Amino acid sequence: MILKESINPYKHSNFLPRMLITLTSLLIFFLIANNVIINLNSEIISIIIKSISDAYLQVSVFVAAVLLVFYGVENIFGIDLTKKLQNGGIYQVPASSALGALPGCGGALLVITQFTTGNLSFGSVVAVLTSTMGDAAFLLIASEPKTGFFIMFLGFFVGLIAGWLVDFTHPKGFLIPAKINNTINNNPIKTTPTAKLLWIFLLMPGLIIGIFMAFQVDVDILLKNKYLDNTATLVGFMGGMLLISLHVIASNGLIYKKTSLNGGTSFERAYLDTNFVTIWVVIAFLAFEIIIFYTAFDLKQLFSHYSVLTPLIAVLVGFIPGCGPQIIVTSIYLMGIIPLSAQIGNAISNDGDALFPVLAIAPKVGLIATLYSAVPALIISYGYLFIFEL
């Protein structure tokens, strides 16, 4: 067996041909897409292409970079959080709130799983659902790091106080499910090597272009040459379409499905999460641009006239299970359409993907915990609105 492995130097010999085929396909598609964009006369199609490109270059590449670092560090240190939570005692609530405050839904899902097995208090569930912002946190941290970390720490402290209040005012064992159903799926989503290569090849130039764009550099003009007129737009459009296609395939057409829950390695989780976030960011960008195109309304001005209602609306959107709607709210905030108070309200009220398993296993727990998290969401968001924004 050892001899067999030692004399097999061509185990990955198909990597180079695959890489050459991938690069050649990219180049051909690049030239075709460039020709289409140059000769394009339809304004609505131009808006679609530009929206997909902007979503990829302004959001997806940064989310991918943050996710790769986050999941990589998590994998390297490999802390067994399950055992630490079970033995936490009074520290279960702060530990749960801290896990919820982390970007993504992994920490929140861990807490929910432990609650359904009787290892955590109901206050821990309220704490984690209050503090979690789900995948929208990656988007906010990548685009506005100071705001992202501010909301993370705010969510942690609000979740901590809410969780302790619930545990101190409710009997021990409150709402812990009597019967446990094991609904965990251990079958990882399969990702092809070619798809991963394409993903990486477009991410590297996309990230560089995205950094230049963040500093208000017109990269299309900077890279313009006799062969390509819109290099940056092409990279963004191809990257966005690739990520959308990969998520549609992985989710079997159910775009609201978070496929990374069944991911394997740190890279695969980052890969699947980025694809998931991208499709919702594209929807937000498209919705905004198409509404402006057909109505000519200034949505920012429109919302400013009803600023007192925006935190309430954002909190109500937070009741919707899943990260998709919350990513849309964060995207709208980053566009400058809604104020920070609305973003704060949504961040505190939303439960991300963590609400799906608790609704499946113990729907009463999920509904009550969500309603509980709405109270601090309304108090904090309206407090911020009246103190700092009006």
Image (tube, rainbow, N blue to C red):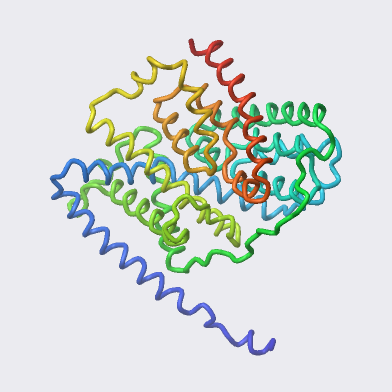
Image quadrant assignment for residue 104: top right
Location of residue 286 (image quadrant): top left
Query: Is 376 left or right of 94, judged from the image as shown?
Result: left
Point out residue 207 in the picture as x, y percentages from the top left corner. Answer: 43, 47
Residue drawn at x 52%, y 43% as measured from the top left: 323
Q: In the image, residue 173 lies at what x, y percent? A: 82, 40
| Residue lying at 48% horizontally and 79% vertically, measured from the top left | 13
Q: Position of residue 379 (x, y in %)?
A: 61, 19
In the rendered image of this protein, does residue 12 appear above or below residue 47? below
- Quadrant (top left, top right, bottom left, bottom right) of the N terminus: bottom right
- Residue 5 located left or right of residue 172: left
Position of 294 compared to 3: left or right?
left
Compared to residue 19, the image places residue 296 above or below, namely: above
Q: How many marks?
A: 0
363 relative position to 303: left or right: right
Residue 266, by quadrant, is bottom right
Residue at 56% x, 31% y is: 347
Residue sitting at x 66%, y 58%: 183
Relative height, residue 157 to residue 259 (above, below): above
Residue 211 percent coordinates (x, y): 42, 40
